[in-house]
Amino acid sequence: MTALWCVVPAAGRGTRVGGDCPKQYLPLAGRPLMLHTLERLAAHPRIAGLLVALAADDGRWPGIGTLGGKPVLTAVGGGERADSVLAGLRALPSGVGEDEFVLVHDAARPCVRSGDIDRLIDAALAGDGGLLGAPLRDTLKRADAHGRSTLTEPREQRWRAFTPQMFRRGQLAAALEAAAREGVAVSDEAMAMERAGFAPLLVEGAEDNIKVTTAADFALAEFLLSRTK
Ligand code: CTP
Ligand code: MG
């Protein structure tokens, strides 16, 4: 059984939540949001270790060195999520080969299900990688500058992208480096890989793998935490 390292970008400011404290350190069910995410990942039998990308001025990291018997390493993240992921990839132990698959999972997604991680690994291992996501459920509208609907977009073949995303260490680092060099802001790993000519496999995962984004999401995530495993 292959065990993978997981890079966890956790260097954001949480501007959409607001306030002084970055969202990954705000309490969820009484403990920092990020701790739930890290514990869930570390508890997964197919995850070998965690590499957490932290903001350069992060004064809140509790100095965790192991979780559930797995190593937890840190790196200094960057200005954009993609910079943080790249910093994490570079800081992985040298024993993680360039051709080995690694996972990337947002610190802000504490409700990811263990079974979905398994399904992603099983499905993506056979090819060049993939990501959890879900087909679009709602009708999609194109808005004009005044917030009026001008067009209904087709829903077919449209997916929402979640994390974890899973790619080979070397290919993902090269794809992120190329995007940075070309000045293209990539919002996730799959976008960098698409630009590099890959077609990441979309693996359907549970919709409750939410990214805690606004203050209101904390109550929802708290509710979902106890219902997802
Ligand atoms: N992230 C990161 N480095 C950045 C920006 C984001 O590591 N420069 C991380 C966040 O900490 C989070 C994940 O990427 O775990 C997803 O990003 P997002 O939900 O956008 O978090 P923030 O950027 O912190 O929030 P906002 O966009 O509202 O400021
Ligand atoms: Mg952000």
Image: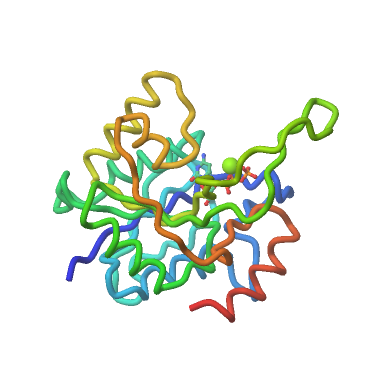
| Colour mode of the rendering | rainbow
Q: Residue furthest top?
A: 182
As displayed, is residue 224 above or below residue 132?
A: below
As displayed, is residue 170 above or below residue 136?
A: above
Residue shown at the point (37%, 75%) measured from the top left:
43
Corner quadrant of residue 116: bottom left
Corner quadrant of residue 153: top right
As displayed, is residue 120 above or below residue 69?
A: above
Give the quadrant of the N terminus.
bottom left
Q: Can you give x and y, in whole percent of width and height, for residue 106 in the image? A: 48, 54
Q: Can you give x and y, in whole percent of width and height, for residue 221 in the image? A: 64, 68
Q: Residue 159 vs residue 200: left or right?
A: right
As displayed, is residue 131 above or below residue 69?
A: above
Q: Can you give x and y, in whole percent of width and height, for residue 112 in the image? A: 49, 67
Residue shown at the point (49%, 58%) measured from the top left:
61
> Regarding ligand 2, which quadrant of the image does it lie in?
top right
Total marks shown come to 0
Q: Residue 22 vs residue 95: left or right?
A: right
Q: Can you give x and y, in whole percent of width and height, for residue 140 in the image? A: 68, 43
Residue shown at the point (28%, 45%) measured from the top left:
91
Say if residue 103 shows up in the picture: yes
66 or 81, nearer to the observer: 81
Say if residue 58 shows up in the picture: no
